[in-house]
């Protein structure tokens, strides 16, 4: 695996520190949204929705920084045409979480590139009339957006390079690499 990687863009200690900071910020905001008296929180009104598969490592670390009563509902999304090429279309795999009406929802994805994925997912969620809807991405490639989409929380802005690791893949591989790295051209 290591020999396919070109260079480390964000190492694990930097990722961990940022995820910690994001957790604090998100916890503060959500606590406020859930009401100072804790009513909404005690009624389990907070739903975190990871976009699979890329966000799984990020979410696993992030949720453990959130000392809030929450449930996890998964959404599977495939971007076409696959591999490292830009997504031109987005399709939802399986069913979208239901019963989001009146819930405070946080959608989490690994990276915002064209913006199509989060655009589609949040549109669909909004039809269920959640009490609030926020989005969080670990990475964002500025200037790449094909649809205007402004996430509420962004871990890192990165240059327009294809990256893998910490959940991000190339053709399904390298998700388990613990740092965010670029791929050697020969490995593509
Ligand atoms: P968008 O729909 O174009 O915003 O792209 C979001 C999805 O494209 C992400 O959830 C990733 O699956 C994939 N993606 C975009 N850029 C990269 C990258 O640099 N490495 C790995 N996956 C990426
Ligand atoms: Mg993805």
Image (cartoon, rainbow, N blue to C red):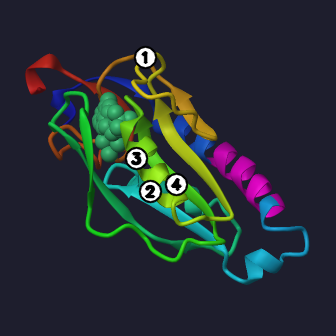
Q: In what element is the residue under mark 1?
A: loop
* Discs 3, 2 touching: Cβ within 8 Å: yes
Residue drawn 70% across the image and 52% down it: 26
Report which residue position mark 1 lands on.
Answer: 159
Q: Residues within 10 Å of mark 3 (few under 14, many from 20)?
A: some
Q: Is residue 25 left or right of residue 155?
A: right
Give the vertical position of 52 relative to 156 (above or below): below
Give the labeled residue for mark 2: 124
Crowd around label 1: few <14 · some 14–19 · many ≥20 (10 Å): some
Residue at 75% in and 82% down? 42
Are there few (<14), some (14-19), or many (20+) residues within 10 Å of tag 2?
few
- Of labels 3 and 4, earlier in sequence is 4
Q: Quadrant of the N terminus?
A: top left
Q: In this view, which residue lies farthest toward the front?
A: 127
Residue on which the image places disc 4: 107
Q: Main SS type for the magenta part? A: helix
Instruction: Please state the horizontal and vertical placement of residue 16, each as a whole percent of the image.
Output: 56, 44
């Amino acid at each position: 695996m290591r020999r396919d990687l070109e260079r480390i863009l964000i190492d694990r200690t930097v990722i961990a520190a940022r995820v910690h900071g994001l957790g604090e910020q998100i916890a503060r905001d959500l606590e406020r949204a859930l009401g100072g008296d804790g009513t909404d929180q005690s009624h389990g009104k907070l739903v975190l929705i990871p976009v699979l598969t890329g966000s799984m490592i990020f979410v696993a670390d992030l949720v453990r920084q959130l000392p809030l009563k929450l449930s996890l509902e998964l959404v599977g999304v495939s971007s076409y045409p696959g591999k490292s090429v830009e997504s031109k279309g987005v399709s939802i795999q399986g069913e979208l979480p239901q019963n989001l009406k009146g819930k405070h929802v946080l959608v989490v994805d690994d990276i915002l590139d064209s913006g199509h994925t989060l655009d589609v997912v949040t549109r669909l969620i909004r039809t269920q009339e959640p009490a609030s809807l926020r989005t969080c991405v670990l990475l964002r490639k500025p200037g790449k957006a094909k649809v205007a989409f402004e996430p509420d929380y962004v871990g890192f802005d990165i240059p327009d390079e294809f990256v893998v690791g910490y959940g991000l893949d190339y053709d399904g591989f390298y998700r388990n690499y613990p740092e965010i790295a670029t791929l050697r051209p020969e490995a593509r």
